[in-house]
Amino acid sequence: MTMLAHPPHPVATGQSPSRRVNTLTNVAHKFGGTSMADAARIRHVADLVRARPEMTQVVVVSAMSGVTDALLALVNAAAANQPWHEQFEVLRQRHLDTAAALLAGNATPAREWLNARFDELARILDAIAVLRGAGHGVAEAISGNGEVWSSRLLHALLQSLGSDYAWCDAREVLVVRHEELGVAVNWEATESNLAQWRQSHPQSRLVVTGYVARDEDGRDTVLGRNGSDYSGAIFAALYKSEELHIWTDVDGVLSADPRIEPEAVTLSAMSYNEACELAYFGAKVIHPQTMAPAIARGLPILIRNTFKPELPGTRIDAAGDENGPVKGLTLAHGLALLNVEGTGMIGVPGTAERVFAALRAARVSVVMISQGSSEHSICCVVKLAEADTARAAIEGAFARELHAGQINGVQVSRDISVLAVVGDRMAGVPGVAARLFDALARSHINIRAIAQGASERNISVAISNQQATLALRAAHAAFWLSPQTISVGLIGPGKVGAALLDQISAAAPRLRREAGLDLRLRAILSTKYLLADELDLGANWRDRDGDFVSNDIDGFMRHLIAAHLPHTVILDCSGSNEVAAKYAQWLAAGIHVITPNKQAGAGPIERYRAIRAAAAQGGGRFRYEATVGAGLPVMQTLRDLIDTGDELTAVAGIFSGTLAWLFNRYDGTTPFSELVREAHQLGYTEPDPRDDLSGVDVARKLVILAREAGRELSLEDVAVENLVPASLLATGRDEFMSRLSELDASTAKRYTDAKARDCVLRYVAQLDRDGKASVGLVELPRSHAFANLQLTDNVVQFSTKRYNSNPMVIQGPGAGPDVTAAGVFADLLRVAASLGARV
């Protein structure tokens, strides 16, 4: 058989794009358990490494996923004299089946080799069962068998494919010793062993068992959890590799745990120091022990995805990169906060030394330290399981001071988490801490303790476990999302609501591109269902499956603010009085409310005052342009007049597109009832036309305008002419529609009388200089501006101190889903502009 060092193969090489021009000649690779999980994945690994161009190649592998735990379970079962043979045979068969799948007709030698190793292991387990126990060293040695088996399978496959790889059992080379700070390599002995091993294994490519080694007394041992990564770094150093690629099942190092923060991003690069800081607080980056050989030799480490080798992954080296002040966020759970305080500590040298000496003597690991400049207190974070030991140790060390009252006591707060914010570039960049604390404050996160080293590489805050997820997501949004990212929730996806969502969806790409505005539609609530998405429901929200719950406003709100994006906006298109009753609560919490719902602006004056006060105090914006005139700039114009010092003296207007259409069309030739039926069929009226003919909706709009101008007007203060006869007010809708003709006689008479005076009928809202408010059918000269409108036009006339003899007139379409939705959308953009968007 002709053996090829690196034959070409039709698979992605997995080269980083930045490295394709200057091809590396010596690269080490480490593949984790998920990459080696079964025959298909082992074959994928073989294809990947064979396609790589480097001449010198070290391939370190973990056990097949789950094997290490299975081996330890076998040891524990045997030591407890419990049944273990069945699970043992399952493990044996898994490896035999993998060999058969990989090697087909050439599997016999590998299967015989595996069977011999499993038979040897069975004898050891039998002995453990007899002795009713296994020493720690024996259990460790057994746990390393998985790497031996998996590496042998990969090597056999490579050989069968014609690639000349050596197989290295690391126990023949690697010599280590277990110290207080971890596993240390005896480099002199290891390098001597490797030189001897290479004399009989001259190949430039090799497969190495991860995780396993021998101690200085020649006993089999392991490198501890994540030991295969450490093995990769050690052998990369021994072979003087130019890079170490650690292959796993993720695209690289993420800015946060994606199980907590779904918008975590893959980092292109980070420094050794940043990786160590994140790993210390529990981030699954890479164990600091793994980086020790790399740091000592300046060896870059790349975290890459075995299943997406075309991606560059994350590069970890001495320099990192210049992207952003913060590289990652991580949470450490299961902690407790110890606080020692008292006036007797102030200015006393050695107090901190006594605290930490007591903790060291008790073998308690301190995760974080915080002390105020007044020296009145010292607090530290320890593991929750060690909290009682830590308190007892400190109380013992300060027994005399406690008795004398110089120290108040040692307080323990349990269920603490630590949020760590890490980045080399935080040093010297003003505002990083401010951004973090602002994000946490807006999320109502209570910070228990703060720590930051002089290097400014890490800001750590102790918080309660219950707030940990919210804290991380709030901080992540502050550093990785646009400051103008808005969590949007819509209530009432009817005609107006649906039109609004379509308009937002159409404009969203342009707004992100040109204005830096990121609108996330995260929840939709109707009277029948709740639609929710962690990121964005998107343009296809109609196709999504909802939770069929009845008016679950609380569930809607919990989802909407759960991720705590920088800002939250509620678009209420419901017309519901119950929803309007929630406005003050939402605004007080800093949530912005935008609505065409007139229930808030024209509802009880006490509620209106509460809404305005909540908006002023809580910071939430309350916008309601579409409540009067749909998309016409009525409210904004009035607001501008008032804000610039003008004073409203009178208002007149036609505020109902339905009534405008009816009286623009009515000329006495067609009965009024027939026009009402036609308007109903065209969708111009409410389902029950009495809602339009009653005039109450027009009155509400007049109240909203009056209140905007500072008038204390209520709906009860408005004289309203109801066009529905008293005999039809209490009937059902169907009966009302069948008796519509009862409106005709009175309407025809009023029309005839007006025509005789060369006037027209219009349904007009009026607020005069004396504060008298009315809405009703009035006669207007044919020359009047209100007499010559388009069919569904609204019109409003503002008389002010500036616009006195010639009032300001705003006219245009004032009804319909699209124009009403446009008015709401315009308010949304105004709110976004106030938050910094370039709209």
Image (cartoon, rainbow, N blue to C red):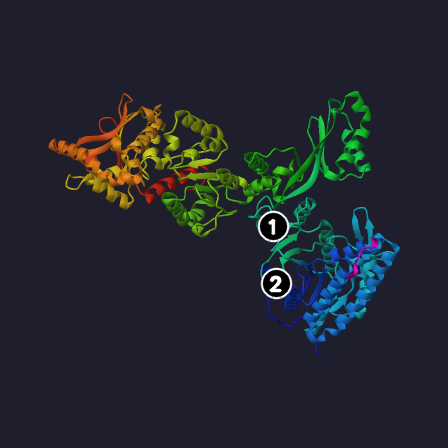
What residue appears at the point 65 percent right and 72 percent down from the top-left corner? 7
* Image quarter in which the N terminus is found: bottom right
* Image quarter in which the C terminus is found: top left
- What stretch of residues is rendered in magenta? 79-85
Q: Nearer the viewer, residue 660 or 156?
A: 660
Residue type marked 2? Gly
User: Would you identify the image quadrant in which residue 629 lies?
Assistant: top left
User: Would you identify the image quadrant in which residue 524 lies?
Assistant: top left
* Whether residue 536 can be seen here: yes
* Residue 319 relative to residue 722: left or right: right
Q: Nearer the viewer, residue 169 or 516?
A: 169
Q: Main secondary structure of the magenta part?
A: loop
Residue 432: x %, y % from top left: 58, 38
Label 2, on which residue? Answer: 14
Label 1, on which residue? Answer: 254
Residue type marked 1? Leu
User: Would you identify the image quadrant in which residue 697 lies?
Assistant: top left
* Whether residue 175 can be seen here: no
